[in-house]
Amino acid sequence: MDASFHLASVPISQTDRYLLFQTLRGAVDIVPADIALALKRSEHLASTSLSEAEADILTRRGYLTDQLPEQERQQSRAALRLTAKQIRPSIEMIFRFPPDSSLTAKSAVGADLIAEVFSIAAELAREEGLLMVSPEITTPEVGREVMNHIVEAATQRDYPLLPQVTIAGLGALWPWLKSENFRQVTLSTNNTNMSLDVQAVTEKIVDCFENQVYVSWKCTVDEMSVEQMGAVRAVCEGVRQKYSNFMLLPLSEKRETPSAASSIATENVLPVIETENAVVLSTLLRFITMPTMINYNPFFHTDPDKLILDIGSAGLSYESATGNLPIEGADAVRRSAASIAAQKREKSWEAIEQTSQCPACRFSLVCGRDWIGKCGYSSIDQCATSFERRMEQVLPLLFFNLRGNWRPPEASQVKA
């Protein structure tokens, strides 16, 4: 028996434990350091330095295997090929409300224009595409008529409605705050809009949960004051007293976030991760909290393209996740719909495999993006080493959020 090709082993800062991740099977476990180090040894030493019970559990979880590395890589390629066939292109329809709520009433946006946006989105996605609807709200009030049209159009077509709001925007959602309209809200804050009124913010978030609407919080902490950081922590703790599964993602645009290496046992330190590593955290969370589902997030995954309607100006634009120049105007977007849809269909697995080193990497099924191309790594080994560092950086925040979101199965820990 040897350690699996798909084994990732990451030390947990300031503990004698490691996090193991089997990237093909999706198993995630916490083990003592001696077990993790035994798995790292080569030439069949892993199985001989473990007890029979330990080896049995590690084998069942996929960390030990009698398969050859090439056999495992073939399995990975088969899973990648199947995943590529099943992934559907997605488009996010963003309805961007103006920062001054009075401008909504003056806007030319009505039922006809909203219906046209939905029609254009359907042309872009074709039959195989996924569509989602995201009102972006930053004010405590929002035009009822416009919002009603958006909610009704999404409901009629059975498109998921995923509001993106600031703290002020949470209050604007109240007339539509019920799970029949939407089940999830993303709260986004930064140093310019983070309120110090802990009680008011806590109550707004709790109101959402009490109406069976889940809130996740993305908080950009750069340039936040000490008081704002304290308010973030206090709000999180206040909500978790009633709803322990509330998730907070403190994010920083700065590289090598200082708090990344802080101990996961420190109660008074809010773990912060680099914004670009949020994809790493979300992948680990999915594998842990939804272990019965297939949660692959392969290297060729792309973010949704965006069809954006500015409610204030009634202007429509299309932004591709590939970074192409945006297309401005409803007529221009509609004229481009056929070519956009065709481009999305052309990206076959064969084309992906021929142009990338990534299929040979043990993280190819879970890394979420082409880090080699994005960061300019010279080899898959260098990229994989960097990805393990990313995993290590997000561990404090992973465990911070798992306190209320995870009830580990009996097999989730290998004991010494």
Image: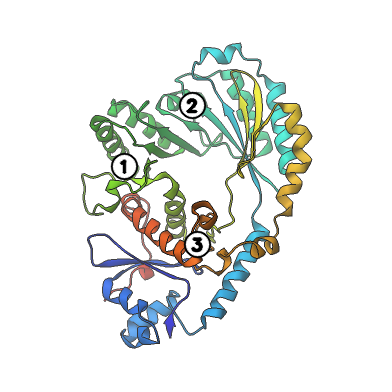
**Distance Cα–Cα, label 3 vs label 1:** 44 Å
Q: Nearer the viewer, residue 131 or 333?
A: 333
Q: Which mark is residue 173?
A: 2
> Which of the pair 124/28 is nearer the observer?
124
Q: Secondary structure at mark 2?
A: loop
Q: Earlier in the sequence, mark 3 or mark 1?
A: 1
Instruction: Name the amino acid type tagged 2.
Output: Leu
Q: Is residue 146 above or below residue 67?
A: above
Which residue has dot 1 on it?
240
Image coordinates of residue 305 in percent, x first then y, are 62, 41
> Which picture quadrant has residue 53?
bottom left
Q: Quadrant of the C terminus?
A: bottom left
Report the residue marked by disc 3: 378
Q: Are marks 2 and 1 in contact (CB under 8 Å)?
A: no
Q: Which mark is residue 169?
A: none
Q: Secondary structure at mark 3?
A: loop
On screen, 335 above or below 343?
Answer: above
Q: Residue at x 77, y 42 (%)?
A: 339
| Image point (33%, 80%), residue name | 54
Rate crowding at label 1 as few (under 14), some (14 to 19) or many (20 or more) other CA atoms within 10 Å.
Answer: some
Occupied quadrant, residue 193: top left
Asked whether, in this view, residue 402 is left or right of residue 23, the answer is left
Q: From what the image shows, is residue 191 above or below residue 410?
A: above
Secondary structure beneath dot 1 equals helix
Q: Position of residue 90 (x, y in %)?
A: 64, 45
Of pointers 2 and 1, the one earlier in the residue sequence = 2
C-alpha gap between disc 2 and disc 3: 48 Å
Give the amino acid at mark 1: Arg
